[in-house]
Image: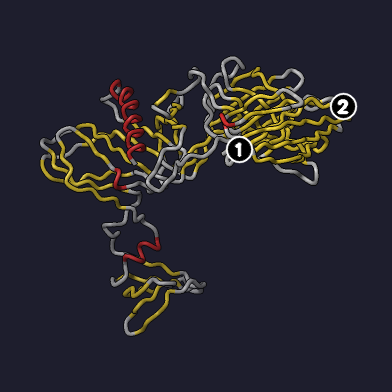
């Protein structure tokens, strides 16, 4: 929980730079994380009297985490705080009326005459049970128009989620108060649209932020920030997961949109925005043309095994989010949808895949499908123990191409172990992709085949 607290403190500090310039004005700031979490900072005007009193803050999130609430204001000490989340609904009114009297008004459909009786609500379990005079009756939902009249609204039912804070004010008068809390029900993700030109080796990339609000409360005119990165929660959310779609991690200094906060990245929406309850909203954050890209055929071998039948190579769009490639921006997690123009020049959807948070300077490989006419069949020729911890594997890969044009297949061999690995007798030159993967670019002629062979000595 410490990591989360430090990150939130950093976000508050960043927001404080802005609030210091407009300290005399109310404002609403929302910082949204990826794992169903948001930090709300709500600056409001209050006018307390001197002494102890209850202040009510309406329009707070219905999914607020009450234990995270912080209220600060000049000359005020907090005594107690309560979150009233029982909202005013017909069913809640009836629940609160158990043991109390209500009036039942029935209207005769034929004559329009109304009859009013006083009833005591006995139960609302799977229906409303009433005591009217000496009889027990179930309030039915039938063709007879019936209304229930209540004397008043119970004190603990609210039209909107309300935070009640008992405070002790040194003096009376108007002042600003900052209410901060964490809430669930708010989330964001990135969606990308890429138009790929295979002949030119370029793609145009647009990025959209998708905001969702299911917190039970609208946030109107909010300064909105988005945190890319998985914060660690007490429940275990935010545990490490391998990055999807990333071939190699980035090592380039950030130059794109957003700003760093420790190991996380914060994107600020350019304008205040209203995030309505039960709404999905999209906001543009990236629009770059002419990014260097290429289509490749890729085969990923998990280990050293044979296969009785060939498998299709994956069709992959390969590009980097580096300055050199023309992109130069970190990419938040989301889905990239790839389009290509047909012979009539119309963009057509050709596939999609997900990526995780991707630092600037990374190489991405977006799989959009499988090539039925480019196949790979692995054969484990031999596996020889060199020592107790090392084994030499002899592999052969038969790569066939049924296309009318030559292709290059990027073969990735996983299952190696870093410094303990030696590649021997390879029929084509290869290179290390990372500490656990070797790679080869295998040219295959049109309507032909290529056999890649190599020995790998590796150990655990």
Q: Is residue 102 visible?
A: yes
Q: Label 1: state its secondary structure.
A: strand
Q: Which residue is mark 1?
A: 390
**Which is nearer the N-term, disc 1 or disc 2?**
1
Residue 295 picture location, percent across and down = 73, 26
Q: How many marks?
A: 2
Question: Residue tagged by mark 2?
Answer: 446
Residue sitting farthest toward the top: 324
Q: Is residue 115 left or right of residue 198?
A: left
x, y (%) of residue 456?
67, 33
Element type at mark 2: loop
Question: Is residue 84 positioned above or below 378 on the image?
Answer: below
Q: Residue furthest front?
A: 387
Quarter of the view holding residue 231: top left
Closer to the camera in the image, 47 or 273: 273
Q: Is residue 431 above or below residue 335?
A: above
Residue 10 location (% of width, % of height): 33, 29
Q: What residue lies at 29% left-to-right and 33% top-to-bottom?
A: 43
Query: Does the residue at mark 1 contact the one at mark 2 (Cβ under 8 Å)?
Result: no
Q: Residue at x 49, y 17 (%)?
A: 255
Quadrant location, the C terminus: top right
Q: Give me the C-alpha separation between circle 1 and circle 2.
A: 39 Å
Q: Which mark is residue 256?
A: none
Looking at the image, which residue sits at the far bottom?
134
């Amino acid at each position: 929980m410490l990591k989360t607290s430090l990150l939130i403190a950093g976000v508050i500090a960043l927001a404080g730079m802005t609030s210091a310039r407009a300290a005399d004005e109310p404002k609403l700031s929302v910082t949204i994380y990826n794992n169903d979490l948001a930090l709300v900072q709500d600056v409001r005007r209050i006018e307390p009297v001197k002494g102890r009193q209850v202040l009510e803050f309406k329009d707070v999130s219905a999914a607020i985490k009450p234990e995270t609430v912080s209220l600060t204001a000049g000359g005020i000490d907090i005594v107690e705080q309560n979150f009233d989340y029982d909202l005013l609904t017909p069913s809640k009114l009836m629940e609160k009326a158990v043991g109390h009297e209500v009036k039942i008004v029935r209207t005769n459909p034929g004559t329009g005459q109304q009859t009013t009786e006083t009833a005591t609500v006995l139960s609302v379990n799977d229906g409303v049970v009433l005591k009217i005079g000496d009889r027990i009756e179930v309030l039915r939902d039938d063709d007879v128009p019936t209304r229930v009249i209540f004397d008043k609204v119970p004190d603990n039912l609210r039209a909107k989620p309300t935070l009640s804070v008992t405070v002790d004010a040194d003096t009376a008068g108007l002042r600003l108060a900052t209410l901060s809390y964490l809430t669930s029900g708010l989330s964001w993700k990135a969606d990308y649209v890429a138009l790929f030109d295979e002949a030119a080796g370029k793609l145009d990339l647009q990025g959209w932020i998708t905001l969702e609000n299911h917190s039970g409360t609208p946030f109107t005119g909010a300064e909105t920030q988005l945190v890319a990165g998985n914060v660690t929660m007490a429940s275990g959310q935010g545990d490490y997961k391998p990055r999807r779609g990333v071939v190699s991690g980035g090592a380039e200094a950030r130059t794109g949109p957003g700003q760093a906060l420790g190991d996380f990245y914060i994107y600020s929406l350019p304008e205040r925005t209203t995030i309505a309850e039960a709404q999905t909203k999209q906001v543009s954050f990236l629009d770059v043309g002419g990014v260097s890209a290429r289509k490749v055929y890729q085969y990923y071998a998990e280990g050293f095994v044979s296969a009785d039948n060939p498998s299709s190579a994956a069709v992959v769009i390969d590009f980097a989010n580096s300055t050199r490639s023309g992109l130069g921006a970190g990419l938040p997690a989301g889905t990239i949808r790839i389009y290509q123009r047909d012979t009539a020049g119309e963009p057509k959807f050709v596939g999609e895949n997900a990526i995780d948070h991707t630092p600037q300077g990374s190489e991405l490989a977006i799989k959009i499908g499988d090539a039925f006419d480019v196949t790979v069949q692995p054969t484990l020729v031999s596996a020889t123990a060199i020592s107790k911890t090392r084994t030499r594997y002899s592999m052969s890969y038969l790569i066939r191409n049924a296309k009318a044009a030559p292709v290059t297949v990027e073969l990735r061999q996983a299952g190696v172990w870093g410094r303990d690995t030696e590649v021997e007798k390879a029929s084509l030159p290869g290179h290390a992709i990372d500490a656990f993967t070797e790679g080869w670019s295998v040219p295959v002629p049109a309507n032909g085949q290529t056999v890649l062979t190599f020995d790998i000595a590796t150990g655990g």
